[in-house]
Amino acid sequence: MELNAQIAVTVLMGVFLVAVATFLTRIENWRSYTPVGGGGSFIEESGYIDEEKPAGIIRWLTTVDHKDIGILYGLYGIIAFAVGGLMVTLMRFDLVTSSSLLGTSTYNALLTSHGITMLFLFGTPIIAAFANYLVPLIIGADDMAFPRINAIAFWLLPPAALLIWAGFFAKPLGLFGPAQTAWTMYTPLSLGAVGPSADAVGGAGVDLMLLGLHLSGVAATMGAINFIATIFTHRGEEVSWANLDIFSWTILTQSGLILFAFPLLGSALLMLLADRNFGTAFFLTDGGNILWQHLFWFFGHPEVYILVLPMMGIVSYVLPRFAGRKLFGFKFVVYSTLAIGVLSFGVWAHHMFATGIDPRVRASFMAVSMAIAIPSAVKTFNWITTLWNGRVRLTTPMLFCIGFISNFIIGGVTGVFLASIPIDLVLHDTYYVVGHFHYVVMGAIAFAGFAGIYYWFPLVTNRMYQASLGKAHFWLTMVGSNITFLAMILLGYGGMPRRYATYLPQFATLHQVATLGAFLLLIGQIIWLYNMVSSWFEGKRVESGDPWDLRQDNVRTVEWQWFEQKLDTQIATDGGDEEVATDGGKPADEAEAVAEERDDD
Amino acid sequence: MEAKIFDRETMLDLVVNFIPLGIILFFIALFVVVTPWGFNVRTSGVMLGLMIVPFVALAILTYLSAKAIAGDEKTKPVYAQGQAGLEEAEPEHHGDDDHTPDETTDASDAAADGNDGEEVDNDEGNDSDGGDADSETTDKQDSDDTADDAGEPAA
Ligand code: HEM
Ligand SMILES: [Cu+2]
């Protein structure tokens, strides 16, 4: 049995490496591609090339258009979000009683996959979805700098997901089980029984997961290089560094972080794989376990900012649209983004305060962790000040932006507490930490993702979602998140350790409360999914080029101008330019009359 | 040029990064003076290095980005985020009058306030070198302006 698994791993790895090598030798000029749109420097030209694409599934398999790839990333991220969400639903169900209903090893496997799926298969790709679709539009580029690399980076992700989840598929076949290492993959646990992969935490499932993670890291790095090149070299003439929008700034910073963080994770993963399979001893010697933690968190802490920075960018971009004014202190937000980018590499050992490293070394990580809280707080004040006296319109994307701020404050403040060594020594490895980072990853990152999805839904689909379902989704998600994660923070104060499938009876009530919150979250997300799918196919058509009425506050942005031109080209019969431009300025309902006659074409 | 880029306005924008730099500096000083675990060249060296390296890196990045951002600000027209290339957009320092009159008084006041808050930096910085006058070729356009936009480059 185990032999089978090892052979499978070896063969898979071999085939993959050969495939990559062949592929590389066959590519000569990575930049030979020119966009089908004809290389014009007008956004509107490259935006309307659907006719030249092949039809059906072939289009999606061969596309190198940044917008198509953005949609692919988006679908991928949403599927991963559903998978990770269903996994955690099972876990919360298991935690209703103090004994484990599913069995501890199943619980551990779900825990591991939930974390990795959400961070690597949902978080990073959903950001890439927004970035691919929007950055070229906003900065006035025809496409990404390297469209083919863009496509490759995406297509590495599906195999990465299959590898990461491999254990779940293999288990029913009686081969090997899923990894149970937790997302941090700490040694010696992840090394198993020293040497061969025959171990209690998943055997070959762990090896495949490590390979999958490595692959996703390669994909992220390729994407990052592409974004850096695009933002540096493909900006439109008018887009100087002083006008670069905040979302592109955060993507640029995030790409820089990826460039330094992911290759390091890749190396550490390969060292772990070698320790597990090839008899090396990187993490077996004295200090090996601390070495793993240093390597992992040197990647791991920047990773949390890799996820949160672009989402802060989305909020900084969308929030002012519905506050009817410009982002307060735009340059503060830009500089603090860059500051977070640099400092995020200087705080990693705040995850290791309890390991027994020298107190002097610990102290310096505390110092930099305190310093990094400032730029985050500055942004928060900027968002609040933007709302102050603004003409606030509580549309669904705006609700999610405000929810983001509210949750991020709680997530950030709990983080600052954890960054203080004495407090961390008490709370480390309790549910308090779980509550802290879920306020950020669910309460903030996912919220900003929803804000972006709702806000740009008309831009991508030409249709409007159903607003009442959007509101229901928001309130269920907001209330559900706060019930679940506040309960976790309280559990942590009570001393409930994290990563356990069983618990002492005194924690039962709070665990059940957390499960109740998770149930609300599940209902909310089902509503959201229904809303998205049904609106995509049958939602009300958007007839106005300015569906959010941004013009009335003079806060319209270029991607909506592109959208307006797209609508014009799709529906204009002959020389309709003038009247269409007029319609764009009016609210959707007023434009409807004109729109109806156009519906036929 | 240097002196012009790092004028009072730019320095004001950079305060946001000076604060974390200051916090790190404070801890460096504190840990040099207060040494409850004693001083040991290797460990204390690592401790100081772990603060000095981020400090230097942040200082360098702040300098470079300020040079790029404030430099462009002084030589090119500045638009609000996401509005460079937008047909109705005009460079930022026109703040208060670019709101359509059909807003409620209350709302336009608020919006104007918002601009004031932001434009303080741009106004002075830009007016001083007057380089932006020629960029104002686009007239203020109302939201229902029917100007033919087909020929205008969007970026
Ligand atoms: C305001 C700045 C922040 C500070 C000072 C901070 C501080 C901390 C500290 C000290 C820990 C370690 C707790 C422990 O294990 O004992 C921690 C854990 C964590 N934080 Fe934060 N945090 C901050 C913001 C964030 C953000 C923005 C994110 C996500 C985007 C995040 C995600 C996480 C995660 C995922 C963990 C747990 C990692 C694990 O052990 O599995 N934090 N944080
Ligand atoms: Cu951290």
Image (tube, grey):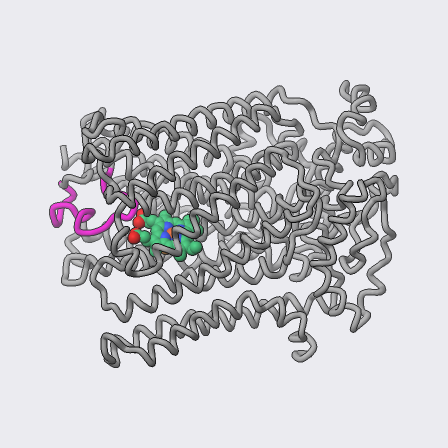
- The location of residue A554, given as percent across then percent down, is 76, 46
Q: How many marks?
A: 0
Q: Which residues are magenta?
A: A179-198
- The location of residue B74, given as percent across then percent down, is 72, 69
Q: Does residue A546 appear in the picture of this structure? A: yes
Q: Is residue A224 left or right of residue A145?
A: left
Residue B34 lies in quadrant:
bottom left
Q: Is residue A535 magenta?
A: no
Q: What residue is at 37 percent from the left and 37 percent from the top?
A: A161
Which residue is nearer to you in this view: A466 or A405? A405
The N terminus of chain A, quarter of image? top left
- The location of residue B7, given as percent across then percent down, is 67, 75
Q: What residue is at 77 percent from the left and 49 percent from the top?
A: B109
Which residue is nearer to you in this view: A305 or A568? A305
Q: Does residue A16 appear in the picture of this structure? A: no
A256, above or below A175, in the image: below
Which residue is nearer to you in this view: B46 or A144? B46
Q: What residue is at 42 percent from the left and 69 percent from the top?
A: B54
Q: Is residue A193 magenta?
A: yes
Q: What residue is at 26 percent from the left and 81 percent from the top?
A: B41
The C terminus of chain A, quarter of image? top right
